[in-house]
Image: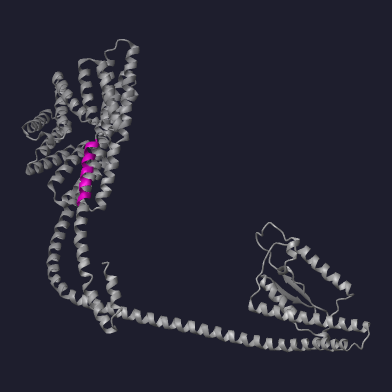
Amino acid sequence: MSELPMRFRCCNLLPQPRRWVLGLALLWLAPVPPIAAAVGEAMPTEEAARAAAEVRIDQLNLAIENLARTDPAGAEQLASDAFTTARDQHYEFGRIEALHNLGRIARLRGQLQAASGYLIEALSAAEALADNRLIAKVGNSYGTVLERQGLDAEALDRHQHVQNLWRDLNDTPGLIASSINIARVFERRQAWNDAQRHYEAALQQYDAYASRERVPPQDVAAIWMGEGRIALRRGLIDQAEYVFTRALKLQTVHQDLVGESAARTGLARVAAARGDEATAVNGFEQALALAGRVGARAEMVEALTQLGRLHLDRAGNELSGVARRERLQHALDFTQHALQLSRQGESDRSVQVGLHQQLADVHELQGDSARALTDLKTAQELRERQFQEQSDARYALLANTANVRERERELIALRASSEQQAKILAQETLLKRALTAAVILLAGIAALLTVRFVETGRAARQRAATNARLAIALQAAEQARARAEEADRIKTEMLGIAAHDLRNPLSSIIGFADLIRTERESMADARGHAGIIVAAAERTLKLVSDLLESAVLDAGQIQLQQTPCDLAVLLADAITRVAARAQAKQQQIDFRAAAGGTGLGLAIVKDLVELHGGTVRAESEGSGRGATFLVELPRLQNPPLRMATAANETDPAHQRVG
């Protein structure tokens, strides 16, 4: 591209007809190789940059997935950044993964409504991509949210659908996750045999899997945690302790704080079942602290609930009334704290129902039947509200399913329309290719006409500018000629006046000098004649000086030497010298119009004042009443610090007495 300006400069050396032909050829041919090269270089570069950006987004999403159970706040910020970057890069897969991570983090924090929103959007986008692996991955998390919302039937249906997808994909880690989720739903339903069967199926799949490192550690720990809860429910305390301990070790190694909190809660329940109250309390407190570090609200509520239940169970064994009251107060405090925490989030209503029932038991043992009855009524109201919320949620799911199916139908219609448009586009492509050459040719002709039009306009503007400058120059020349004629007229008049004024004193000088030469006069008469001669000579000298000074001013040869001075002192000194000379000659200021003059003095004053940057003007009240001449000189800004001295006054450049 850098050679194009030189080619067009070379065109200016050719005759006009050949220049247009060569210009058309260059316009047609010159841009083609550089543009093709630029496109050829840009496309791989853009593709490489896009691929690199997608790799970074995938790596970020993977890091978020591992960080979510350790630092949910940091993971949430990274997930938001990943979502924004993927959206800006139009990387749909990365955007869906970021939404999935945001949903998982919200679920861990107990924000079930937000989690549901993120996961539904991610699931819809994954279905639009028709990526079954991504659909199954997001579906696992969405089923868990449905489970937390108390929608067991919908959660079970979702997990079974996802399990079928994993089976079609022959993905063992996915099958293990689905088996765990299904077992957890049966566990919520207290269908212990079905839950045990699915946990064992997940464990068998894990043991038979060759690439066990691909199975997430939290899924392996979830199998052991599920078996531990069922064993504890069945009174198999040693077995429960064994599997809880295995889960705790695995979660500690992988720094899964949420899972570690759940495992410590399980071990504390084992200690409580054995009657080891100190170990149980310590375990529950450790679980509560771990859950509080990551904001895992569900695990915090579980630990507080178990602490309250522990003190409630021990209160019945206390013989002392004081100890019994303290136990019941501890049970009340932990249970109320758990209830308050559960209300802050969006936990399952069944959790709050159980907490109110536990509070009713505490109040009953405290002898407060009124509060116990209030808690039982609240529990009943919560059951009814839970039923209504579950019904609303089911209706919302049905509506969402209908919307998804409608979008699927729209997508099918869009695909059919796209295929039809592709056929039409293929037909139009041939026509476009045929028209391309004509369009390019017309564009070249239009470009040449545009250049021609621009050059014509530029030439017209140049002619107009030249004519304008010529008119200005002619006007200036005319004004200069008029000024020259006026100056010549004034000069002629001035010379006439000067010739008259010079002739009279010179005649006097010659006449009286001739009288003195004849020596016919007495000495006194000779002195008188000499005085007349001197006066005439001085007048002549002054007239000649004025003429010369006027000529110098007209020629612009006077250079000012401006120095600071005290104007009052300067004027006083000038008046003093003039007054002394006038008194010596016994002269008075007497002006008569009949005496006449050359008029050079006022002109010289005007030129000198303007040379100083000042102004001179005259004021008069009328004919016969005299005139006042005002001279205004500018004051210098920031003058030098020194003042004019007596030595300056002797400088001829500073002496001007009119």
The secondary structure that most of the magenta stretch takes on is: helix
From the viewer's perspective, is 483 left or right of 336? right
Q: Is residue 275 magenta?
A: no
Compare residues 431 and 345 and report the one nearer the observer. Answer: 431
Q: Position of residue 422 (x, y in %)?
A: 13, 65
The residue under the point 72% across, 68% down is 654
Asked if residue 314 can be seen in this view, the reply is yes
User: Considering the image in quadrants, where does the C terminus appear?
Assistant: bottom right
Which residue lies most toward the top here?
Answer: 319
Q: Can residue 52 be found in the magenta stretch? A: yes
Residue range (magenta) = 51-68
Q: Is residue 393 visible?
A: no
The quadrant in which the N terminus is found is bottom left
Comparing 222 with 591, the one in front is 591
- Residue toward you, 464 or 218: 464
Image coordinates for residue 236, horizontal then vertical, percent? 13, 20
Q: Position of residue 283 (x, y in %)?
A: 25, 21
Residue 555, by quadrant, is bottom right
Q: How is the image coloured?
A: one colour
Rendering coords of residue 224 (x, y %): 14, 27
